[in-house]
Image (cartoon, helix red, strand yellow):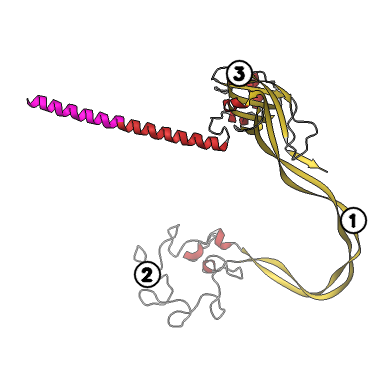
Amino acid sequence: MTLVFLFFKFGTFVAVAEFHHLKGLLTMKRLRQQWLSTALSACAALSLTACDKDYTDFVSNYAAERIPLKVNLKSTTSVVTAEGGTNFYQVRYFKRTQRVCDTVVCGSTWENVCHTRRVCENRWNLGLNAMRGGRDNDNNRGGGRDNDNNRGGGRDNDNNRGGGRDNDNNRGGGSGGRDNDNNRGGGRDNDNNRGGGRDNDNNRGGGWGHDDDSWNRPREYCRNVEDCSVESVPQYCEQNCRDVEIEDSDSTYVYSRVSVVLEGVPQVDASKIEGVSIGVDTNDAFKGVVMYPAYRPEKAGSAFDGLKTTDKTFVVLQARGYKLVEATQWVPETFKVGDPIVIRLKVASVGGKKTLFSSVGTEKGFPAKRQEVR
């Protein structure tokens, strides 16, 4: 009885859990349908095929510029037209007049003029070099001068020359104390002789004598010196002024509208056109995929069928049941920056709902992106 009751409770629990799971899935599906309906409504309001996945962006890998185009779903024309645009960099040259004068000396004035120059000189280092080791300012070994300008050092605490007292209160200098052998006078030098090491000339005479080359050599000291004097300063005047014609230029970006007319696609089938792109100024990668099909994009490999390595401009169409056949009109020779560009392409219906990639190309180059107007 207990087992049956437990089984009944467990089965009820599973049923309740499954019911809530299915309810959650239905709710998510309903929300997803509502979102999709809202998105489609927004696409209809925009009248564009922006909500279709456009895979023609691969064109940018094989040309200097990709011009993407969009199809207007509510166009009143009998055939489908994809529209977009591109910018041209325009340099405009023109003539203008400019005032020009000759500059001549027409006098002078006396003025106080100052010039700054840098002066450098070598000086012997002060400090430890001057104490029994290196050289002093007069390049003599043994130390600098004291406060009375006498060589040998200053006065001790009793105002007597020669140094302070040692540990036994005897005068004689700060070297004081006893060495390791309990002898006064300081430790032993490198030759085991008492009294200190050798100086740079290998002469004995004190512990400070081991100054290195960086302390002992003279150093360069520099300063700025300003020299002022009264000088004659020329005065300039402008003469023979006249107006001359010169060439000048300005530059700006100019937008040109680009349209591709898909002849053979009725307006009712505009929704089947998923993407249109123009590749301008093909590169070496374009030549490679045209020659070697194995390197073509996986989903859009057929877009390069029929193209030639000498093509400089090509148009790719992504559509369901339609493919490009040929071009009936490219960019006219009389194109000027700012003029609309209209390209007419013939499209054939192949039926079915499968998305196809097709293209047409031309050896004619697209108008140069830099245009000069004179």
> From this viewpoint, which residue is outermost toward the right?
240
Q: Which residues are magenta?
A: 1-22
Indicate left or right for 278 with 367 as reference. left
**Whole-number angstrom distance, CA of label 2 to CA of label 3:** 96 Å
Could you say which is closer to the camera, residue 49 or residue 79? 79
What residue sits 90% from the left and 58% below the top?
243
Instruction: Return the disc, 1 or 2, that comes first in the chain's sequence.
Output: 2
Amino acid type of disc 2? Gly
Give the x, y percent position of residue 31.
39, 35
In which image quadrant can residue 290 be found?
A: top right
Q: Determine which residue is flagged by label 1.
A: 244
**Whole-number angstrom distance, CA of label 3 to CA of label 1:** 62 Å
Give the x, y percent position of residue 144.
55, 72
Amino acid type of disc 3? Pro
The kind of secondary structure element at disc 3 is: helix
Q: Determine which residue is flagged by label 3.
A: 293
The kind of secondary structure element at disc 1 is: strand
Q: How many marks?
A: 3
Could you say which is closer to the camera, residue 55 or residue 38? 38
Mark 2 Cα-neighbour bin, 10 Å: few <14, some 14–19, many ≥20: some
**Whole-number angstrom distance, CA of label 1 to CA of label 2:** 94 Å
- Secondary structure mostly seen in magenta is helix
| Quadrant housing the N terminus | top left
Q: In front: mark 2 or mark 3? A: 3
Q: Determine which residue is flagged by label 2.
A: 177
Query: In the rendered structure, are the residues bearing label 3 and label 1 in contact, judged by CB atoms less than 8 Å apart?
Result: no
